Image: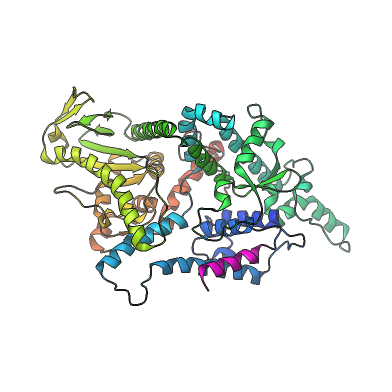
Amino acid sequence: MSIEAKSQELKELVSVYDTGWFLGNLCQLTTCIASNAAKDQLGTLSSPLRQLYFLGGLFISTDSIEDYELQYTHEQWNRIVELLNEIEQEYYKLFFPEEDEAVDENWKKVREVAMPSFLSYFNQGPLNYEEQTLNWVEGLYTQLNDIIELETGIKTEHFVEFYNNLDKLVQANFHTHSTEGKPLRKNWNKYARLQVGTAEDVPDFIKEIGEKNRPLYTFVADYGIINRFYAEELVSDTLTIDQVKIILNLLSCSRSNSDFLYYTSTKPGNPLYEKPIISLEEDMYQVFEVKQVIHAIESLLESLCTKTKENTTKYVSKKGKLLEQNIIDLFGKLLKKEYEVFQGYYVDGCEQDILILWKEYAFIIEAKGYKLREPLRDPNRAFVRIKDDFKGSVGYAYEQTNRVEKKFVEQVPLRIEDENGNLIKEIDTRQYKDGDFSIIVNLQSFGQIQNDLSTLLVLKEDSAYPWVVRFDDLETFLLTLIAKRKAPIYFVNFLIMREKLHGKLFCSDELEVCGGYITETINDNIIDKSDKIATSPDLANIFDEQYRKGMGFKNEKLLREKRSGKAFFWG
């Protein structure tokens, strides 16, 4: 069977279920991924989060039926999983050699780049914490409120308030349905898609227990009950009902038949990514996964702010400056004192982003806010696009860092100038012998080809590989080091070790490398003895563990509960 045939079968298979119940069930399964729960349902899925989203997208792209089924059987779910994995395998086959196709070094090189880039792009969801997206949205788009208000009639603050109110509501619903004695929503039972009760012929004390625990039993049978709401429930002192309705109109969709069929579809794309709130009957709504709402808001605001050339220029400028400032602030938290920062400086008449000097170490930093283009299915065409994108972003940033790096390598004076060529300061590079590090910070990651630069980056003479890292990963890593009271030299030693991994590394998530360093699963001795090193997702678990204790993000949620050590976090 083809990808199309298998996707169509899967779409028809899930179309028979109730909208609210099925979406709630899928949402519940997404909360089980991190804890490795629900193995009977998720255990054999190859990319659980992306596959569940794909399944939900297919489901929403069908018409609802009157004679629906409320739950699936064990056999029906197994067939769903079977099809999900078979569909993913069909995409792997895109990179297999065709009949009589010559498999030479060029063929291997193309697949070495195209395949991991394709799979990283489509198989990985947003790998960050919600506060990171929230802080970015607030930091960037409040500066562009004039554009946003002209387009929507509301401001960035209203979108953020909407998200926070929705998050609080779902959290409150979770607590009241799962914790005995917590006050429930008024008329809570009207949010349920099925009714739970006890048999008539059981003893009265059993009926009393059943009635007492009915909210919990209902929640267990219908997880989506905590995700359903009316617009009025999101109103607050700073968010009116009219503003709520504007946002719901922008971020919600209804279940209806559409052409969405492929795992990699973008036109139309998966409706749950851009509109993760589903409009049910009688003015009720259901959010699929709360965290996706802030990502949808970010995507929406970006599209609103880039409709014209003038607005796009303004957007790009604000984005670049914010990224640079965030990097400087983050290094300030790590280094604390005895450091010097140069921002927007010039070397040999060329603009550079950031130079941070700390003791006998120099951090040469370039910040890049480029946006990744979707990888093409055809490996040969995909290779050309990926290579061009890589050259225009990471490659260009490397040219910039290398310009400064050469001064340190050659041990010649580094003249820091302004845009008019006026001397700001002359740096004696002899004070930083073997202590310079090039770091390229981007907003989105190329995955494998970024984590192991040996595939596409050609080093200049006497040059070392830069560390290319997504800002969210950099922030998570450095805040964890700070939380664990690691001295800055610990980070310097990481950079020294990190250079050795190029040419040996198989990794799609940089935090796996960072986690491996902290836990000493990856160290100099292992690198020196190994020809190839493959990381695994569990290496990044240390960051989730730290997040549950308190990471140190600006406006971090539930910080008091985290620091109490008494809270249990699920999902």
Q: In the figure, residue 412 lies in which quadrant?
A: top left
Q: Residue at x 73, y 63 (%)?
A: 69
For residue 21, side relative to residue 526 (left or right): right
Residue 491, image x, y percentages: 30, 43
Nearer the observer, 97 or 441 = 97
Q: Residue at x 65, y 72 (%)?
A: 75
Nearer the observer, 173 or 334 = 173
- Residue 485 in view (yes/no): yes
Residue 294, image x, y percentages: 54, 41
Q: Residue at x 20, y 42 (%)?
A: 402
Colour mapping used in the image: rainbow
Q: In the figure, residue 66 lies in which quadrant?
A: bottom right
Magenta-highlighted residues: 1-15
Q: Residue at x 25, y 56 (%)?
A: 454
For residue 121, side relative to residue 415 (left or right): right
* Above or below 211: residue 142: above
User: What is the residue that sits farthest to the bottom in this orientation?
Assistant: 100
Chief secondary structure of the magenta span?
helix
* Above or below 80: residue 152: above
Residue 317, image x, y percentages: 38, 32
Residue 248, image x, y percentages: 64, 40
For residue 437, side relative to residue 545 (left or right): left
